[in-house]
Amino acid sequence: MRALAAAIRNGSIKISPDADKPIPRPILMSAGALALVALVSIATGRTTGVGLAETPQMRTIAHRDLRLAEHADGSAAVVDAVTRAPLISVRVGEGAFAVEALRNLARDRVRKGVPAGGAFVLALKSDGRLVLEDPETRQQVELRAFGERQAKAFAGLLPAADAENTRGVR
């Protein structure tokens, strides 16, 4: 690597075109054509909807509002947003998928400039999907994408009255 860096520095290897050796015209034309095809494809997809994946809007049959409580010592907890009852507690150095998923949604709020105070919604949809939603940013995380074990861990956070509905969680 050092020899390559030295050769680039002393000019024996050129990594940018110059007047003596320009980039060949067919390569420039091909790159331009590729960029044009990409732009036309994106525009077509956005105007017609072809090729775009959307999450189907299904009726919510059970839900729980969740908050992430970060503590000064570095520990965290997932709490019920209404009763403030702790559902999952994680000590410093430990990890829990539920806590990390909520942290990611909270980071997304900060990135988008949305106030961090609102609750997140854990929702069981009528088709059996379990979804973590952020009503502030309209972001949705389909928990089945992380595997059955993670989805079942979140299903355990739904209120006990709704536990019978979670048997079919997909």
Image (cartoon, rainbow, N blue to C red):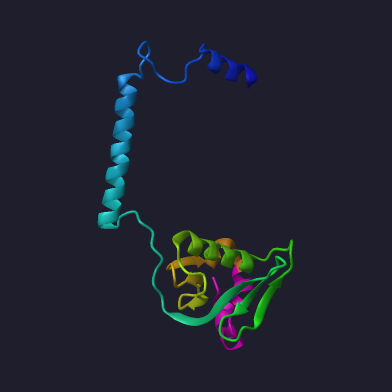
Front position in the image: 92 or 155: 92
Prevailing SS of the magenta stretch: helix
Residue positioned most to the bottom: 161
> Is residue 157 at least partly visible in the picture?
no
Image vertical order of residue 106 relative to residue 165, above or below: above
147 sits to left or right of 54: right
Residue 120 place in picture, x, y as percent: 52, 74
46 sits to left or right of 74: left
Image vertical order of residue 59 relative to residue 72, above or below: below
Image vertical order of residue 36 relative to residue 109, above or below: above
Residue 27 place in picture, x, y as percent: 34, 24
Q: Is residue 165 magenta?
A: yes
Quadrant in which the N terminus is drawn: top right
Residue positioned 67% across, 66% down in the render: 96
Circle count: 0
The answer to which quarter of the image holds residue 100 is bottom right
Q: Is residue 122 magenta?
A: no
Residue 18 place in picture, x, y as percent: 38, 15
The answer to which quarter of the image holds residue 101 is bottom right
Image vertical order of residue 30 relative to residue 52, above or below: above
Front position in the image: 131 or 134: 134
Quadrant in which the C terminus is drawn: bottom right
Residue 58 place in picture, x, y as percent: 41, 75
Front position in the image: 116 or 12: 116
> Is residue 93 at least partly visible in the picture?
yes
Which portion, as a residue range, is magenta?
151-170
Residue positioned 47% across, 82% down in the render: 61
